[in-house]
Image (cartoon, helix red, strand yellow):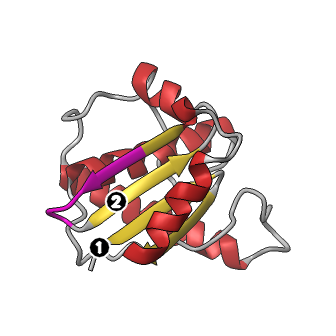
Amino acid sequence: MKHSLYIIVLSFFLSGCGASQSAVSDNSQSSVPEEDIVRIANDDIEYEIIIIEPGFNSWLISMARPEGYYSQSYMESRNQIYVQAWNSRVLQVNRFDPNLYGMQIDYNPNIDYGYEVNYKLYNYFIYFQLTYNQKLSTFIPRI
């Protein structure tokens, strides 16, 4: 079964393949410019990530470290920490802005999402922390 990991204007959720088709179709009709949608799909790993965040794609191209700079294991370990912090903040609506932390992320450390998915997710967390002045861990987000 193919799964999709969506990051849509600061909202995260994991859904099945059937839902991904309608979600992608609905987003293509929205007012979000094409350049603000980042989609990565890999049938071999059966996961994809879709990021709809104004400015993220241009930041990823111009500011983020290039693919290959970080190892997959490095990004996986950081993503686990960031996801845990993110999910904790989603549950604390009185303490953290629900407009920033919309939905929980189902990131399983026992699943190999592949390099590209981890790269985009890791860089989204860096972008998010720098753009919205948030700190998801003790690590200082750097580019």
Is residue 136 in view from this perspective? no
Q: Residues within 10 Å of mark 2 (few under 14, many from 20)?
A: many
Q: Which residue shows up at 52% across the image and 66% down it?
A: 22
Q: Is residue 122 above or below residue 18?
A: above
For the residues labelled 2 and 1, the Cα–Cα distance comes to 8 Å
Disc 1: which residue:
2
Q: Position of residue 141 (x, y in %)?
A: 50, 40
Picture quarter with the C terminus: top left
Q: What type is the residue that disc 1 sits on? A: Lys
Q: Position of residue 121 (x, y in %)?
A: 41, 52
Q: Which residue shows up at 57% across the image and 47% down it?
A: 28
Disc 2: which residue:
48
Residue 95, magenta (yes or no):
no
Q: Is residue 142 left or right of residue 97?
A: left
Q: Is residue 20 left or right of residue 118?
A: right
Q: Are marks 2 and 1 in contact (CB under 8 Å)?
A: yes
Q: Position of residue 92 (x, y in %)?
A: 75, 76
SS label for mark 1 = loop
Q: Is residue 3 left or right of residue 13?
A: left
Q: Which residue shows up at 20% across the image and 67% down it?
A: 112
Q: Position of residue 125 (x, y in %)?
A: 50, 49
Q: Residues within 10 Å of mark 1 (few under 14, many from 20)?
A: some
Ranked by sequence position, the earlier of labels 2 and 1 is: 1
Q: Which residues are magenta?
A: 39-45
Residue at the far top: name it: 62
Residue 43, magenta (yes or no):
yes
Residue in the foreground of this view, choosing between 25 and 4: 25
Q: Is residue 101 above or below residue 93?
A: above
